[in-house]
Image: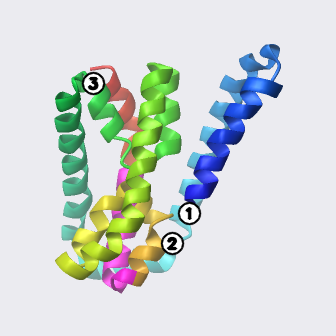
């Protein structure tokens, strides 16, 4: 995943610098919007196909909803604290934190509705979160317990970091990770635009 992300960025930069004609830049906005729509449809299909997972949720009860709430609050508080330390405005730091690790959506959203520079920062910050999650999940599961291992992944716990969580924890934690990722992923398209305009 790391090589794919870095490779895609480098390929895009090289393509844009040397190959892409200036007249084609106007079409990038439409292509980005289309890609976002396809991505969101894919998330919806993925959610709808998790039938066994949804049956298991009933047995676990409503308390599992506290996990995404606490992860969201912690992510936003950490982003604002870090942004304050770096001298960033509240709206920018909170919107970047509201990406919850979903770098492709949060970065593009902020770039489209606010500024390209802040969008690039959101992209890099949320990519870094996902990469750190791959390192931290097994360590946190071993030292602090299964639930703690869900938090670093943020929105990615329903897809890219889910296999690692399943391997490092147990079946119940895996279901909680799906719920956590689903709720946080659902919040990203709403929270990022609201916070960036504060």
**Colour treatment of the image:** rainbow
Q: Secondary structure at mark 2?
A: loop
Please tell me whether residue 130 is drawn above or below residue 90 in the rendered image: below
Q: Position of residue 107 (x, y in %)?
A: 48, 35
Give the number of the disc on residue 50: 2
* First along the sequence among labels 3 and 2: 2
Q: Is residue 186 visible?
A: yes
In the picture, the disc for residue 71 is: none
Q: Is residue 28 left or right of residue 67?
A: right
The residue carrying mark 1 is 46
Viewer-closest of 48 and 106: 106
Q: Residue furthest top?
A: 23
Query: Would you place residue 171 above or below residue 125 in this image?
Result: below
Calculate the distance from the C-alpha at mark 1 to the C-alpha at mark 2.
7 Å
Query: In the rendered image, which quarter contains the C terminus?
Result: top left
x 21%, y 23%: residue: 87
**What residue is shown at x 18% (from left), y 76% (from top)?**
144
Between 174 and 24, the one lying in front of the other is 24
Residue 18 is left or right of residue 114, and the answer is right
Q: Is residue 180 magenta?
A: yes
Mark on residue 91? 3
Q: SS of the residue at dot 1?
A: helix
Quarter residue 15 falls in: top right
The span shown in magenta is 168-185
Q: Using the image, determine if residue 76 lies above or below residue 174.
A: above
Task: State the predominant SS element of the stretch in magenta.
Answer: helix
**Do labels 1 and 2 touch, CB within 8 Å?**
yes
């Amino acid at each position: 995943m790391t090589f794919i992300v870095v490779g895609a960025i480098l390929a895009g930069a090289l393509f844009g610098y040397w190959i892409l004609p200036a007249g084609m830049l106007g079409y990038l906005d439409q292509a980005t919007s289309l890609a976002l729509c396809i991505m969101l449809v894919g998330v919806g299909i993925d959610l709808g196909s998790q039938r066994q997972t949804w049956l298991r949720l009933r047995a676990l009860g409503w308390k599992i909803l506290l996990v995404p709430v606490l992860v969201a609050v912690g992510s936003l508080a950490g982003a604002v604290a870090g942004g304050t330390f770096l001298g960033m405005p509240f709206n920018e730091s909170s919107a970047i934190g509201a990406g919850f690790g979903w770098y492709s959506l949060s970065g593009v959203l902020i770039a489209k509705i606010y500024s390209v520079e802040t969008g690039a920062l959101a992209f890099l910050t949320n990519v870094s979160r996902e990469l750190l999650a791959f390192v931290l999940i097994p360590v946190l599961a071993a030292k602090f317990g299964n639930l703690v291992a869900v938090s670093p992944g943020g929105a990615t716990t329903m897809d890219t970091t889910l296999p690692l969580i399943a391997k490092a924890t147990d079946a119940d934690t895996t279901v909680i990770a799906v719920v956590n990722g689903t709720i946080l992923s659902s919040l990203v398209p709403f929270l990022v635009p609201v916070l960036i305009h504060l």
